[in-house]
Amino acid sequence: MPVRGVRGATSVPADTREGILDATRELLREVLRANKIEKFDDIVSIVFTTTPDLVATFPAEAARELGMHLVPLLCASEIAVPGRLPRCVRLLMHLNTETHPKDIVHVYLREAKALRPDIHSAQ
């Protein structure tokens, strides 16, 4: 079965543990819903990144709270590019799926919609 990548991003109102977890849970739920992912066994791994201004917790904690206990998760910091969207959580989910790449739904929520104005599929 092919492995496909699903991208997503969201913004967080403030650098707090609950703010990061709430935004990440919302993003994960929408990625799962939009791509009809019903079994976590289909998820190969997820890489989360945050902008350098988010340090209160790891976004991967939200995935664990949703039950992704066997999915390999990794958190990293984004490059600090001046003038870019602050307080942003991004994800790259690797997925075992027969879904054609053109049918993968990439999800951008909240202020992160501005990162990919060309993508309107899940907004």
Image (cartoon, rainbow, N blue to C red):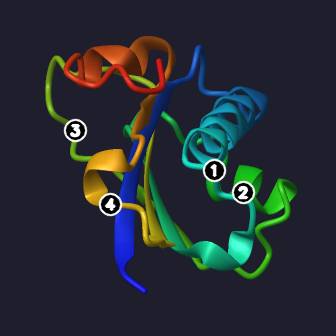
Q: Quadrant of the N terminus?
A: bottom left
The answer for how far apart the CA atoms under marks 4 and 1 are is 13 Å
The answer for how far apart the CA atoms under marks 4 and 3 are is 33 Å
Say what secondary structure mark 4 lies in.
loop
Say what secondary structure mark 2 lies in.
helix
Image mark for residue 49: none
Depth check, mark 4 against mark 3: the one in front is 4
The answer for how far apart the CA atoms under marks 2 and 3 are is 25 Å
Residue 70 location, x and y as percent?
74, 82
Residue 21 visible: yes
Residue at 14 percent of width and 24 percent of height: 82
Q: Which residue is mark 4?
A: 100
Residue 88 visible: no
Residue at 60 percent of width and 26 percent of height: 15
User: Quick one: label 2 or label 4, which is nearer the N terminus?
Assistant: 2
Image mark for residue 80: 3
Q: Which residue is mark 1?
A: 36
Q: Is residue 53 left or right of residue 69?
A: left
Residue 48 location, x and y as percent?
48, 55
Image mark for residue 63: 2
The residue positioned farthest toward the bottom in the image shown:
1
The answer for how far apart the CA atoms under marks 3 and 1 are is 33 Å
Q: Amino acid at mark 3?
A: Ala
User: Quick one: label 1 or label 2, which is nearer the N terminus?
Assistant: 1
Classify residue 117 by image quadrant: top left
Say what secondary structure mark 1 lies in.
loop
Nearer-the-camera pick, 28 or 73: 28
Depth check, mark 2 against mark 4: the one in front is 4
Q: Is residue 66 left or right of residue 96?
A: right
